[in-house]
Image (cartoon, rainbow, N blue to C red):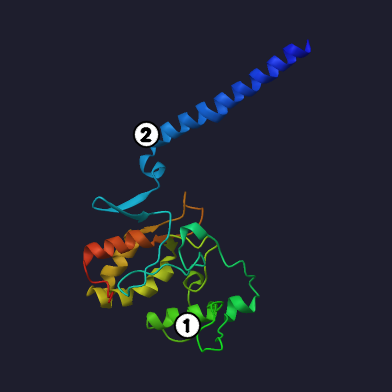
């Protein structure tokens, strides 16, 4: 085969592969996704009326006492989707365990201060009225690898139920029923762990007791 024929065959192969796998295949998959899995293709968005308030897949911060609180986040100042990431600290890191708490010469907190696991655990026990030595699920006092985890463990959610019930004027049984309704089991029955979607549960709490979040 002549060089010109080899060149022509090579060029045609590249163009064909580019057309089929670079344009046609992605277009077909995108179209099918939009038809068969419309909600997922659009980002699994959740709405209050016509207003988009978040996604099932991206966590966000909740601090009012009438809400279910997510696990701590190291993404930016917390749940910053543009700075997704963890602390990158090893399990034996003194900073991770005990944190850093320093003062500047003017008496203000050092910007480099960091709450360790002990700090997060103490704060969690205090806000939920638990004993100082109460055993906590790991996700109550540790940050996720992405910093954007939308879910917490059922054990974590259950420990928050009494606080939420008190603020909302609901019974603890009612709150736990809402949590259970928004709890997903293991995928295919064997993959992962049971988990509670924080945003969906909080929307259900708002529906059950509107306006009673405890926010100032």
Q: Quadrant of the N terminus?
A: top right
Q: Are marks 1 and 2 in contact (CB under 8 Å)?
A: no
Q: Quadrant of residue 18?
A: top right
Which residue is pictured at 55% across the width and 61% down the height?
85
Residue at x 43%, y 78% (from the top left corner): 124
Is 48 in front, or is 140? Answer: 48
**Which sits in the foreground, 52 or 189?**
52
- Where 175 falls versus 5 (above or below)? below
Quadrant of the drawing holding the C terminus = bottom left
Number of other residues with Cα within 10 Å of mark 1, as a class: few under 14, some 14 to 19, many 20 or more: some
Left or right side of 44 for 169: left
All told, the count of numbered labels is: 2
> Does dot 1 land on a helix, a strand or a loop?
helix
Could one spot residue 56 in this view of the protein?
A: yes
Q: In the figure, 136 relative to 13: above or below?
A: below
Q: Is residue 181 left or right of residue 145?
A: left
Q: Earlier in the sequence, mark 1 or mark 2?
A: 2
**Residue 2: x, y in percent?**
78, 10
Report x, y in % for residue 81: 47, 58
How far is mark 1 from mark 2, CA to CA? 48 Å
Residue 51, given in percent of the width and then of the height, sits at 27, 53
- Residue at image location 27% in from the left, 61% down from the top: 204
Which residue is farthest top? 1
Which labelled disc corresponds to residue 35?
Answer: 2
Q: Which mark is residue 122?
A: 1
Question: In the image, is residue 91 above or below residue 3?
Answer: below
The image quadrant of residue 169 is bottom left
């Amino acid at each position: 085969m002549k060089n010109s024929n080899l060149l022509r065959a090579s060029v045609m192969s590249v163009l064909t592969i580019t057309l089929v796998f670079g344009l046609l295949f992605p277009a077909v998959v995108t179209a099918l996704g939009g038809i068969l899995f419309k909600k997922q293709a659009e980002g699994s968005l959740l709405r209050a009326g016509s207003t988009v308030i978040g996604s099932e897949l991206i966590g966000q911060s909740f601090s009012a006492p009438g809400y279910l609180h997510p696990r701590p986040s190291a993404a930016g100042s917390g749940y910053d989707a543009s700075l997704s990431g963890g602390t990158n600290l090893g399990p034996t890191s003194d900073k991770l365990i005990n944190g850093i708490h320093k003062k500047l010469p003017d008496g203000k907190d050092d910007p480099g201060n960091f709450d360790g696991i002990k700090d997060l655990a103490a704060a969690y026990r205090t806000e939920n009225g638990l004993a100082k030595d109460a055993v906590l699920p790991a996700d109550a006092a540790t940050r996720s690898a992405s910093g954007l985890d939308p879910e917490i463990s059922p054990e974590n959610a259950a420990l928050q139920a009494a606080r939420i019930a008190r603020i909302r004027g609901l019974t603890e049984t009612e709150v736990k029923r809402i949590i259970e309704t928004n709890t997903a089991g293991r995928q295919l029955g064997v993959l992962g762990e049971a988990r509670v979607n924080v945003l969906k549960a909080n929307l259900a709490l708002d529906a059950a007791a509107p306006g009673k979040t405890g926010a100032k």
